[in-house]
Amino acid sequence: MIIGSRDPKRGEVAIIKMKQTAPNIDITVEPLNLADLKSVRSFAGTIHGKVEGIDILINNAGVMAVPTRELTADGFEMHFGTNHLGHFALTGLLLPLIEKNHGRIVTVSAQSAQMGDLDFSDLKMDRKYRPMAGYNRSKLSNILFARELNRRAKKKGITSIAVHPGTSPTGIGRNAPKGTKAFGLLLMKIFGTPPDQSSWPSLIAATDSTITGDIYLGLGMNPLKAKKPKYVDFPKKALDVQLAEKLWLLSEKLTGVHYDLKKHFLPIDPLR
């Protein structure tokens, strides 16, 4: 197992914790900053040199509610650039290794994707920046990407699944404005699930071979009613296949990462 971490020291701390319960686990950490496409390419190159194939890729990293408008190293709005474009580029660069093993790709979204909106005319949010709007848009993009990837890569034996972890105190909102952070902590106290339980959707999607993609696996808001992951409804906008294809083509253009799937992907079904 390989962890990609923006801060390798924190990655090492995570490894120590994991080895407390699984002492024989074979796991390493490599530097990866999804807000910098140069770092993404470097990480992918390292992985290509380390392994012959990939069974599972979990796209889990992210930023949330960055209080002021910030840009990535490549000039993208921070949420969109990190949460979506970073994962899009990483997955595309690792796709040959995933294809070799007929692997599974799990992309972590969020319930707030339901409130997401994609304005292609203002991707950098120059006109109006709202922290949660940026986050919600990136989470909608995660689902659109996961579904479109499943459609395009299915005939190559690759499975792509979107999941959401419910509301969990993972530290993702550490950079949020004080008011947003306080409200978020209150929600977590009422509705939240611990991080280990919130990881269940990702783990099940990654390891259950009966899950074949094109579904959304997650936890409900109330952990008392969601003791285990279940299929949940996609946000309506995430079902728009034309929107997904437009986002896909734009993402290839912005990242410079092109997926070699043209001869294999399924045609668009407008009724899907």
Image (cartoon, grey):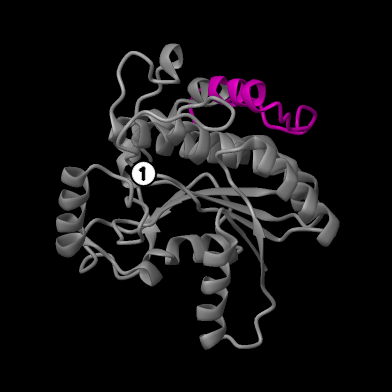
**Please, is residue 233 above or below residue 9 in the view?**
above
Residue at figure coordinates x 47%, y 47% from the top left: 215
Residue pointed to by mark 1: 64
Residue 173 visible within the image: yes
Amino acid type, residue under disc 1 in the picture = Met
Q: Residue at x 38, y 31 (%)?
A: 137
Q: Is residue 262 left or right of residue 189?
A: right
In screen coordinates, is 185 left or right of 70? left
Assess whether residue 253 is covered by the magenta stretch. yes
Residue 260 is a magenta residue:
yes
Camera-side residue: 32 or 111? 32
| Residue 51 visible in the displayed image | no
Q: Secondary structure at mark 1?
A: loop
Q: Position of residue 212 (x, y in %)?
A: 58, 53
The range drawn in magenta is 246-272
Above or below, 213 against 1 in this view is: above
Q: Position of residue 147 (x, y in %)?
A: 54, 38
